Amino acid sequence: MIEVKKVNKSFTLFNQNNAKITVFKNLNFEVNPGEIVALKGPSGIGKSSILKMIYGSYIIDKGAIIINNKNIATLSAQEILKLRKTSIGYVSQFLKVIPRISALDVIMEPLLNSGDNKNNAYKKSIKLLKDLNIEKNLWHLSPLTFSGGEQQRINIARGFIKDLPYLLLDEPTASLDSRNRDIIINLIKAKSNRGVSIIGIFHDEYSRKKLNVREIDLNIETKH
Amino acid sequence: MIIPLLNVTNLSKSYDNIVGCKNISMSLYPGEVLGIVGESGSGKTTLINCLSGNLEPDRGKIIFNINNKETDFLNISESEKRKFIRTDLAFVHQNPRDGLRLNVSAGGNIGEKLMSVGYRHYGNIRSLATKWINKVEIDKSRIDDLPITFSGGMLQRLQIAKNLITSPNVIFMDEPTGGLDVSVQARVLDLIRSLVNELNLTVIIVSHDLAVIRLLADKMIVMKNGTVIESGLSDQVLEDPQQEYTQLLVSSVLHV
């Protein structure tokens, strides 16, 4: 379960006349195992910020985010690294990888980093590449040369390759055609059926409906 | 509870009246990659020179804990220190010419390093050297060539091989991709990254290139005027910087 309790977040932009932007005050919600929660609200309201706070890449100003009985707000850097490795998958909006590394290696990396053997990691990755409908002649090329939709699917593959209890998805179905969108929706459903707690940002009504999400409307939840 | 591999407390070093680095405290755990960023003159190189034994700090504590053996780095004899540096630490210089002997063959450069930690059997040295030349993607037919015949990228990869072949416990890298063409940089970055993953290396890397830090480092510290002004997970410091200077640094990066 993920619990977000009384969370405040603001940004101070020192180089822009110390402008202070308050994103949330007193944000509360929780996500149960097997549940898919969709964050809803206009662009700029802080949907991605929530995912980043849960993942530990944004500082939590006030309040607590509890995962595995641990409060992200008070964990040290190495504790967060460990928690990410064992528990949290995160699919960012854009793929960030070193040029030259093949799509297959990008996907295998999280498995190899947590000590899985090469053969096993290879088999799992190939299966996922096939499931995601990535053409075989692309497997050994750097994903930086791929189309937006293909990059997106490689990014998803890397986030989905491990069996982790929590998944954070930042627009996983954006820039995909309808066929590939359905493939991703089915993969997300399968994760949810296995008890994974999922928080996502889905730009389209279609994905939200198909995934049977519980919506959290940030316009209502956050009092500015 | 995992014990840090390296624990630094209140480390300071001045050059006469000029501050090199001041009151630096930090820790590093096994298998972590720590990035150090900051403008020229901020004390990055002074700090890693102190940690790697190239410079004697004025004050502070440096404790290494390797295989449950604690080494109080600033309070051991000179001979123990030399031995520790030889067997447990490695230093990859920005300019590979500083870390290699150019009038000794590529294989010789690597072989020397092995001999310094006790290898004596020529056949073993040769086969290990060949394996590493291959690992850093240099054609093994070049093993007997002099490094002066190598390109900049090859020299850097040779220097990396020379440093890693003895399985050191902490590797220091000072701008390892700094002097290279952009196209060559990516290759060296990729090589470092895959070796870090494969061998579970613990690395401290200095770079002014935030993209290098983002791709390689788990944690990072930001230095200014000799002090650490911000530290944390690399993605956190880069995406949600809390200090004015770090915000300036991050917002100054050009995107192509």
Image: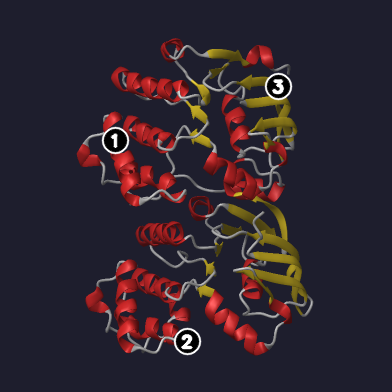
Q: Which residue is mark 1?
A: A127
Secondary element type, mark 2: helix
* Residue A27 badge: 3
Residue B242 in view, yes or no = yes
Q: Disc 3: which chain?
A: A
Image location of residue B254, percent across then percent down = 50, 47
Image location of residue A16, percent across then percent down = 69, 38
Q: Disc 2: which chain?
A: B
Secondary element type, mark 1: helix
Q: Separation of disc 2 and disc 3 at Cα?
A: 59 Å
**Residue at horizontal 64 percent and vertical 37 percent from the top:** A58
* Residue A167 badge: none
Q: Which residue is mark 2?
A: B116
Image location of residue B26, percent across then percent down = 70, 60
The nearer-to-camera label among 3 and 1 is 1
Image location of residue B116, percent across then percent down = 47, 87
Is the residue marked by circle 2 packed among few (<14), some (14-19), or many (20+) residues within 10 Å?
few
Q: Who comes first in sequence, dot 3 or dot 1?
A: 3
Q: Amino acid under label 2?
A: Ser
Is the residue marked by circle 3 packed among few (<14), some (14-19), or many (20+) residues within 10 Å?
some
Q: Are marks 2 and 3 in contact (CB under 8 Å)?
A: no
Secondary element type, mark 3: strand
